[in-house]
Amino acid sequence: MRVIDPAAVTAAVRDLAIAAACDLEPDILDALVAARDRETSPLSRNILELLLTNCDIASREKIPICQDTGIAVVFAFLGREARVEGDLATAIQEGVRQGYSEGYLRMSVCDPLTRINTMTNTPAVIHLELVAGDTLRLCMLPKGCGSENMSGLSMLPPSAGKPGIIRYVAELVVKAGSNPCPPVTVGVGIGGSFEKAALLAKQALLRPVGQPAERRDVADLEAEILAVINEQGQGVHGMGGNNTALAVHIETYPSHIASLPVAVNIQCHAHRHKEIIL
């Protein structure tokens, strides 16, 4: 049994929080470059160039890519042959607190009713999953609310089938307009139950941008939805063009015979995600 020091967890989460705010991963940078190169609208191509310049400055100067440094969402995949001494959740929350404080990141978390800011950007949203192995994989996914607020979930009738899924996802993304700061990455959860579909949609965003699903039929559906979204011409920041979305990622789970839950979690062009394995 591997024993993991909670202090190591806190330090890792702190570093992930700061890095995620300032440095985009190669998968999203490559996707933005590819979008710029294939963009048909001169205005949108210019905006994409400015977005890439912004990302470069943020990385070099170690300042946030966006003023909205988001609510911290942390996925923790804990191996069954590993254990964390003490409280894993407490260690993660402390890492988020330290990261947002030491990184001078905007504190955006508040009580949902009083709207009083916690001033620490905690509590983070933590999803824990037990997996095989003896390691702890931590994935940091800061979610700004320009994109998060444009997400949605629908309990479709099974008779809606694939056409209904395509229509729901594409209409939701296009209707969002410029609010989620496109070009977006679209996480989609299909199946399970009400809450499972939403979790799947968010977890779909952990996949490298543009990497197709393992199931061929799911990968084909991803490509079809992406094409439908981009055919609408909403474009970069709503300015027109052929790059409303960079990718559509779908995760599925078996559902009840009378149900077809479909959730959509949208991520802005600055798809901030970092991970580490302890």
Image (spheres, helix red, strand yellow):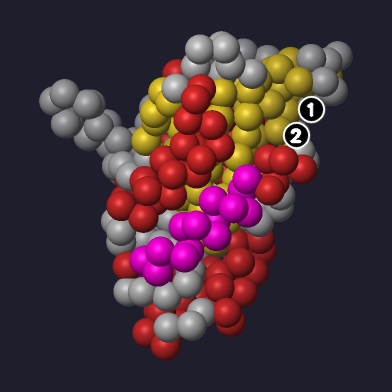
Q: Are marks 1 and 2 in contact (CB under 8 Å)?
A: yes
Classify mark 1: helix, strand or loop.
Answer: loop
Give SS at disc 2.
loop
Q: Is residue 78 above or below residue 267?
A: above
Q: Can residue 232 be found in the magenta stretch? A: yes
Which of the image's four quarters has the C terminus?
top right
Residue at 37 percent of width and 48 percent of height = 171
Residue 116 belongs to the span the image colors magenta: no
Q: Which residue is mark 2?
A: 278
Q: Relative to the observer, which residue lies in front, 190 or 141? A: 190
Q: Position of residue 186 (x, y in %)?
A: 50, 48
The stretch of residues the image draws in magenta is 221-237
Q: Is residue 52 left or right of residue 109?
A: right
Label of residue 135 in the image? 1
**Separation (CA) of disc 1 from disc 2:** 6 Å
Seen in the picture, residue 89 relative to 54 is either above or below; the reply is above
Between 102 and 48, the one lying in front of the other is 48
| Residue in view at x 68 percent, y 48 percent | 220
* Total tally of numbered discs in the picture: 2
Give the amino acid at mark 1: Thr
